[in-house]
Amino acid sequence: MAQPLDDITVISPHFKRRLSGVTSTVIQLIPEQRRQGLGILTLGPGLPPHLPKMRWSQLPGLWKRPKSGGNRVWHARRNNEMLAGLVLRDILRMPLKLLFTSAAQRHHSRYTRWLISRMDAVVATNAKSGSFLQVPHTVIRHGVDLDLFHPSGEVDAAMPADLKGRHIVGCFGRVRHQKGTDLFVKAMIELLPDHPDWMAVISGRVTPEHSGFADQLKAEIAAAGLKERIRFLGEVDDIKPWYRRLTLYVAPSRNEGFGLTPLEAMASGTAVVASDAGAYAEMIIENETGAVVPAGNYIRLRDAIAAFLNPQKAIEAGRKGRQHVEATFGLSREADQLSDVYARLLSTTPPSPHATVTQGNG
């Protein structure tokens, strides 16, 4: 059933079918925003059915202002979503304010810079991403749902029986060079023979263009005689129990936008070793909740993992990680800060031909 637009003040488009970090953010964030009383709907494919959505056929309804009598916010997170917002606002003259959230940690193309320059406000997901923006912006770090991701003192009944009594180190995400899956596998091949109580699991999508990469990793594992101790799980429908089952989580990415998985792991009471890609270094307290190493540096990654194959050290880091996420990265905090940005946009007059942006420190 289509959601009425009368009380809707924020539209969060999602123009991608495949699961991504942006998808995970939207799935977690929008229910929290709704709980806080925000009138927000999604638009587009690739999202679960429980999220509140508007239909494409309802787009003409955006010409009509909400009950509040003001504008609506179009909150884009991708180039195509920014472009759609520009068409709706500047060509079709719909009463919209355009907000863009940037997670990229690289210099933007000329086209992307032009799109960003037309936004009414810009948010960066971390300080490093903000450093690549050439416009004023507000830094708002992503949060994690502390009810969905939580520690558990019990072994999940759905876990394979032969994992009982083992400590598990995991690496989750798409299996590809960018994600550093090969670095993780190499470290496991080198370290696990000396740690018989540990096993490793890898979960994530293998797309056709990266199938050769994944096959090579599996061949290396087989050649090392570790097929039973380093397992590819494929895509897992519900990854949350696996986070709770891990003793150590590794995020070895060579490149990231923001990257939620270390937060999800720490919220689940699991220690984390991560590269300094994305916002990982801003999440982890060195030697307390885990460790951060230079992206792509295999030796530093291997040695950091080795240090946390001490179960007592890893378990204590996981306990501190949960406390750290509760204090700093709760989802409600992200929702609150975004609400402040929305409020500033909705309290201003319609945009001039050259849109301005709001600056803040998050």
Image: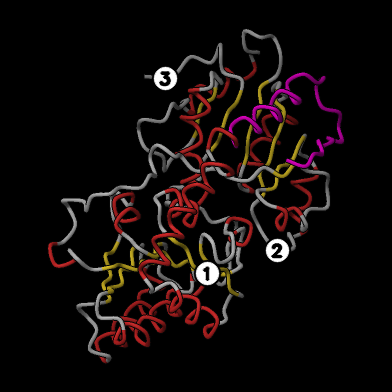
Q: Which residue is mark 3?
A: 2
Circle 1 or circle 2, nearest the eye: 1
Give the alpha-carbon distance from disc 1 to disc 2, as whole Å. 15 Å
* 155 sits left or right of 213 in the view: left
* Residue 13 position by quadrant: top right
Q: Which residue is mark 1?
A: 253
Q: Residue at x 43, y 59 (%)?
A: 316
Query: Alpha carbon of mark 3 to alpha carbon of mark 1: how far?
Result: 40 Å
Q: Which class describes the residues within 10 Å of circle 3: few (<14), some (14-19), or many (20+)?
A: few
Marks 2/3: CA–CA distance = 38 Å
Dot 1 crowding, Cα within 10 Å, few <14, some 14–19, many 20+: many
Helix or strand or loop: what does disc 1 sit on?
loop
Specify whether residue 245 is painted magenta. Answer: no
Name which of mark 1 and mark 2 comes first in the sequence.
Answer: 2
User: Which amino acid does the dot numbered 2 rest on?
Assistant: Arg
Please say if 185 is above or below 208: below
How far from the left and from the top, in percent, is residue 3? Answer: 45, 18
Q: Secondary structure at mark 3?
A: loop
Q: Which residues are magenta?
A: 334-362
Q: How many marks?
A: 3
Residue 154 at x, y = what percent?
23, 50
Question: Split into 4 quadrants, where in the image is the N terminus?
Answer: top left
Q: Amino acid at mark 1?
A: Ser
Rendering quarter of residue 119: top right
Magenta stretch: includes residue 336:
yes
Q: Are marks 1 and 2 in contact (CB under 8 Å)?
A: no
Task: Look at the numbered discs 2 and 3 and tell me whether their residues touch, using CB distance below 8 Å.
Answer: no
Q: Nearer the viewer, residue 250 or 324?
A: 324
